[in-house]
Image (tube, rainbow, N blue to C red):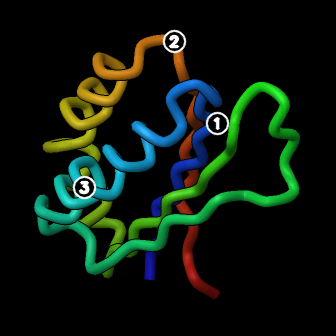
Amino acid sequence: MIVYNVTIKIDLNINDVWVQFMKEEHIPQVLATGCFTGHKFYRIVEADQTDGITYAVQYFANSMSDYFTYQNEHATALQQQVKDLFPDKFIAFRTVLKEV
């Protein structure tokens, strides 16, 4: 199994709107690509929250091929949508994990 992990620190002022957007729009759009079999959405509880709340979204793929399909065909547009809706309100980094 491949896990595509996106860690995001979101501005406190838009946290509730962003969480709703993620649950109702963005995550369903990512899953609708057919590249992932499921997901988990976590709030990181031991992070410094003075300037934002940190979350991790994990998407599960059966293979690196499925992950690469997502990256090559869907990721740019979906990531740009988030940037356009929440400009300068978050930072994100992405990692790819393989189950051992």
Residue tagged 2? 88
Residue 9 circle label: 1
Tell which tag, 1 or 3, sits nearer the viewer. Answer: 3
CB contact under 8 Å: marks 3 and 2: no
Name which quarter of the figure residue 46 lies in: bottom right
Q: Residue at x 61, y 51 (%)?
A: 55
- Amino acid type, label 2: Asp
Mark 2 residue element: loop
Is the C terminus in the top left, top right, bottom left or bottom right quadrant? bottom right
Whole-angstrom CA distance, mark 1 to mark 3, is: 19 Å
Which is nearer the N-term, disc 1 or disc 3? 1
Whole-angstrom CA distance, mark 1 to mark 2, is: 11 Å
Mark 1 residue element: strand
Name which quarter of the figure residue 11 lies in: top right
**Residue 56 vs residue 78: left or right?**
right
Which is nearer the N-term, disc 3 or disc 2? 3
**Residue 37 vs residue 52: left or right?**
left
Mark 3 residue element: helix
CB contact under 8 Å: marks 1 and 3: no
Residue tagged 3? 24
Q: Residue at x 42, y 13 (%)?
A: 87
Whole-angstrom CA distance, mark 3 to mark 2, is: 21 Å
